[in-house]
Amino acid sequence: MKKMQHAKKVYITATAAFLTLSLALASIASAAGAITLTPTTQAPGGSVTVDGTGFGATKNVAIGFGAEVNGSNTDMNYTGTGTGPYSGRVSYWPIKPGSFVLYSDTTAGGGIVSTYTDNGDGTTIWSYDGSPMGTINYTTGEWSRSSTVDVSGIATNYSATYTRYQYNVTPAAGVTTLASGAFSASITVPAAVADGSYAVTAVDTAGNKATGFLIVDHLIPEGLTVGVMMLLSAIAVIVGTRYFRKPKIKSYTPV
């Protein structure tokens, strides 16, 4: 009997610990960034407001439109001396956090090929010793890398692979989150897209990312503002409610 009670106690304790861990994991998951789009349907060339929450405090944000696309660059221009940092830039951004890999080839001068692999938080890990020796800015495509030896006299070929998005719709003025991690920005739907559903993805320099979906519809009148669309939607609801309201039937007493 005592053994059964002990086993039951262990089981309850283990269950409680599992529930505590599950709640903790759920809390972590709920802390992820999120965005809302207003309106959720827009014509090509139209304006959409992107409101974000749960991003890093006072971080730069970039916004991509459309599907994920494989990107790559070879023989990139770079600057730097000594042990670094050496820096350059890829051709497309924003970059999906966790997807970037920089290749540093110094074999022309008797060196090695090293990789700097995206850690998902804006830093890259050096293949030589596993230390964080580089950076990648997801919002601008700028990268950097350092070394433990002076490589300024060795010709280096830099190449990179990464995941980007079909269009970069980040406002020209830039987007920066508040201390709360929130932001609001207006984007323009690319004029060349066909009707359909498209992902809108916001990323910040710390690797926080969130995606929403926009319906593109050419039938929406060009130049229709968000405010007018919301007003028309409200009017449509009122009219529809009145139209479908059950009519009152007045009874008559025959004479």
Image: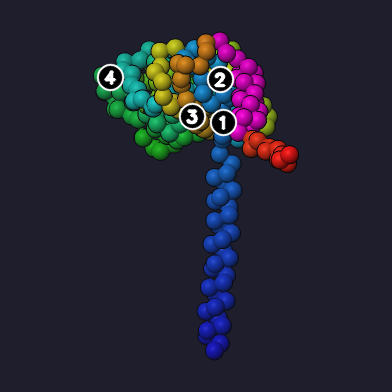
Percent of width and height locating residue 53:
61, 32
Percent of width and height locating residue 156:
33, 18
83 left or right, relative to 6:
left
Which amino acid type is marked by label 1? Ile
Label 3 to label 4, Cα distance in Å? 49 Å
Sequence-first tag of 2 and 1: 1
Residue density around tag 2, few if under 14, some if 14–19, many if 20 or more, within 10 Å: many
Label 4 to label 2, Cα distance in Å? 51 Å
Q: Secondary structure at mark 1?
A: strand
Q: Can residue 75 be seen in this snapshot? A: yes
Q: Which residue is mark 3?
A: 213
Quadrant housing residue 239:
top right
Front position in the image: 155 or 225:
225
Which amino acid type is marked by label 3? Phe
Vertical placement of 14 versus 46: above or below? below
Front position in the image: 21 or 187:
187
Name the front one of labels 2 and 1. Answer: 2
Q: Which residue is mark 4?
A: 109
